[in-house]
Amino acid sequence: MDYLLLTPILSAAPDNDTVKLFFASSVIIFLVIWRILAKHFFKPVFEVLEQREARTVGDEHEAKLLTDQDKRAQIELASELKIIRAQAIKKREAIVSEAKQQAAKVLETAHAQAAEELKGARAQITVLREQAKQDLSSEIEKLAAVTYDRLLSANNTKTLH
């Protein structure tokens, strides 16, 4: 069958040299066609494939880098959040402590003020009591004098009758 294909090319019965020449020319033609295809077809296709592979690998590498950066950022953020929470708790505790101290001072001031007012009120009550005693004492004397005068005048009017 191969012989039938070669018949138009070879006009006579093939001999060994003709077959070798045909084979060599076929190889040369194949290599030339291969070279042309490689230069104009395979090379651009391989370049596109290599570029695509590079982009894919690059994108995968970039994605991995971004993932690693994200993990590091999350870890840093979590640690910063812990620090900020601890600081906030300390500030809150300081504010609560200061508020308790201020409340204690206010209560102490209020107790002292109430004690002073109570002391003043007691002193005023004592003064008023003494004044009332004196007023009562003078009123008793006046009342006694009036009663005495009435009794005397009542006695004098009885004796005169």
Image (spheres, grey):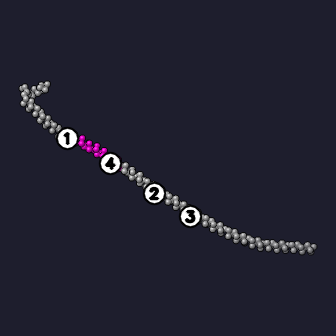
Q: Which image quadrant is residue 49 in?
A: top left
Q: Amino acid at mark 2?
A: Gln
Q: Horizontally, is 161 left or right of 78 in the view?
A: right
Q: Which residue is mark 4?
A: 65
Residue 156: x %, y % from top left = 89, 74
C-alpha span from label 1 to label 3: 90 Å
Q: Which residue is mark 3?
A: 105
Q: Is residue 100 above or below residue 36?
A: below
C-alpha span from label 3 to label 4: 59 Å
Q: Earlier in the sequence, mark 4 or mark 1?
A: 1
C-alpha span from label 2 to label 4: 32 Å
Q: Amino acid at mark 1?
A: Lys
Residue 44: x %, y % from top left = 20, 41
Q: Horizontally, is 97 left or right of 41 in the view?
A: right
Q: Residue at x 39, y 50 (%)?
A: 74
Q: Which residue is mark 2?
A: 87
Q: Amino acid at mark 4?
A: Leu
